[in-house]
Amino acid sequence: MDESYLMHEIKIHDKVFIPYITFEEIDYAIKRMANTIYEEHKNDVPVFVGVLNGVVMFMSDFLKRYPGECEISFLKLKSYEGTESTGKVEIVMDIPMDLTGRHVIIMEDIIDTGNTLQELYRILDTKNTKSIKIATLLYKPEAYKKNLNIDLIALTIPDKFVVGYGLDYDGLGRNLPDIYQIKTEE
Ligand code: 5GP
Ligand code: MG
Ligand code: MG
């Protein structure tokens, strides 16, 4: 079957998006990240804490690539409306698991301003974990405004809005297997 039709320009709501990162490139970066984390945690059982909803695709592909023992848990936050961060982070669902004494790795779809990350860190800091690391599929260094160190980054991207591979634009686009970038007139 010819699958190239999946990589054309697409329209979601009122905006046009262009193909940007293919699933093959994403998968390669995830494999590399999984091996790096495994090297640091082969002698313990880390807990991967995914931030819903954006992390679903990344988390499931990452777990298939992780070669060691691990546990998983999720929490749900909300910070974005449309294509702009609102700056306010809301906890919609807290982590339903005791993290006392555990090595926790926060799994994020994307780190933009860092507002969400800072709030996440504040939440996890109250849970008596043994360690906290931050892993993200995508990172926008030009937009990042915080001082928290990001331990693991799969892919670094410019400060442009992206969709696909779990990331949405007002609810749509999460099921696209590749990542698309917003089309802007230059
Ligand atoms: P931050 O709090 O770092 O500004 O933003 C974090 C959250 O905003 C992400 O978890 C994601 O939900 C959303 N976000 C930030 N940048 C983008 C983007 O380029 N595309 C999409 N779809 N969501 C984004
Ligand atoms: Mg997120
Ligand atoms: Mg969103």
Image (spheres, rainbow, N blue to C red):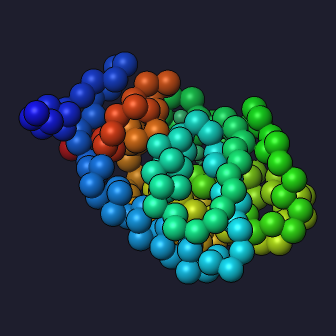
Tell me: 106 left or right of 171: right
Horizontal arrangement in the rendering, residue 160 relative to residue 97 (left or right): left
Is 169 left, or right, of 124 in this rendering? left
Quarter of the figure with the N terminus: top left
Report which quarter residue 16 is drawn in.
top left
Residue most extreme to the top: 13
Whole-percent x, y for residue 53 in the image: 58, 36
Q: What residue lies at 49% left-to-right and 24% top-to-bottom? A: 171
Q: Is residue 43 above or below residue 13?
A: below
Task: Please name the residue shown 76% across and 58% down the image.
Answer: 121
Quadrant that contains the C terminus: top left
Whether residue 101 is visible here, answered yes or no, is yes
Which of the pair 23/184 is nearer the observer?
A: 23
Q: Is residue 184 visible?
A: no
165 or 19, which is in the foreground?
A: 165
Residue 156: image location, x then y, percent: 40, 63
Query: Residue 62: where, in percent of width, then height?
Result: 49, 56
Q: Position of residue 38 (x, y in %)?
A: 56, 74
Q: Which residue corresponds to the image point at 64% horizontal and 76% vertical from the top-left?
A: 41
